[in-house]
Amino acid sequence: MKYLKNTLVFIFLMMIILFIISILYYYDIISSNTSSILKIVLYFVLFIISGFTVGIKSKNRAYIEGIKQSFIFIIISLILSLTLKNTKINLIFYYLLLTIVITSSSIIGINFKKKN
């Protein structure tokens, strides 16, 4: 249940951010390069926040909780990319990097909880 709630919050925030970036791009406020960079940076920020909250909520072994959460996000992203036929080899490295980001931030989150 905790994974579902965290995942739904993440997807909702991601959709809002992508909608705002798309509107800015549509009205030529930002360029396509800026749009791509903003999307990548905001994805990483959202993944860090998501991993951090999973780490704070977990009782022990935050790295396992972070790996579980990252696999949920990766499965959802793979399903979306396969339905949109947007599969590339770079995508696999991108998902691996996101797994490392979520796992690391969940470890930081549990260590933050232990200090406070």
Image (cartoon, rainbow, N blue to C red):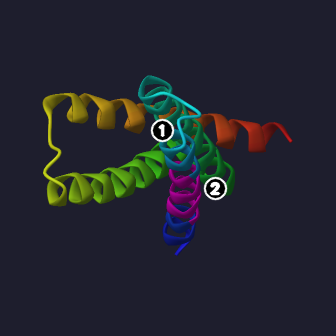
Q: Residues within 10 Å of mark 2 (few under 14, many from 20)?
A: few
**42 within the magenta span:** no
Cα–Cα gap, marks 1 and 2? 15 Å
- Residue 15 horizontal/vertical position (percent): 51, 58
Pointers 1 and 2 in contact (C-beta within 8 Å): no
Q: Residue at x 61, y 55 (%)?
A: 58
Spot the residue most to the front.
Answer: 27
Per the rendered image, the range of residues in magenta is: 9-19
Q: As rendered, which of 57 and 46 lies closer to the eye?
A: 46
In the rendered image, which quarter is residue 109 located in? top right
Q: Earlier in the sequence, mark 1 or mark 2?
A: 2
In the rendered image, which quarter is residue 87 located in? top left
Visible residue check, residue 101: yes
The residue tagged 1 is 103
The residue tagged 2 is 59
Spot the residue most to the right.
Answer: 116
What amino acid does circle 2 point to? Answer: Lys
Q: Residues within 10 Å of mark 1 (few under 14, many from 20)?
A: many
Q: Residue at x 31, y 38 (%)?
A: 95
Q: Residue at x 48, y 52 (%)?
A: 65
- Residue 104 horizontal/vertical position (percent): 52, 32
- Residue 13 horizontal/vertical position (percent): 59, 57
Position of residue 36 in the picture relative to residue 110 (left or right)? left
In the rendered image, which quarter is residue 48 located in? top right
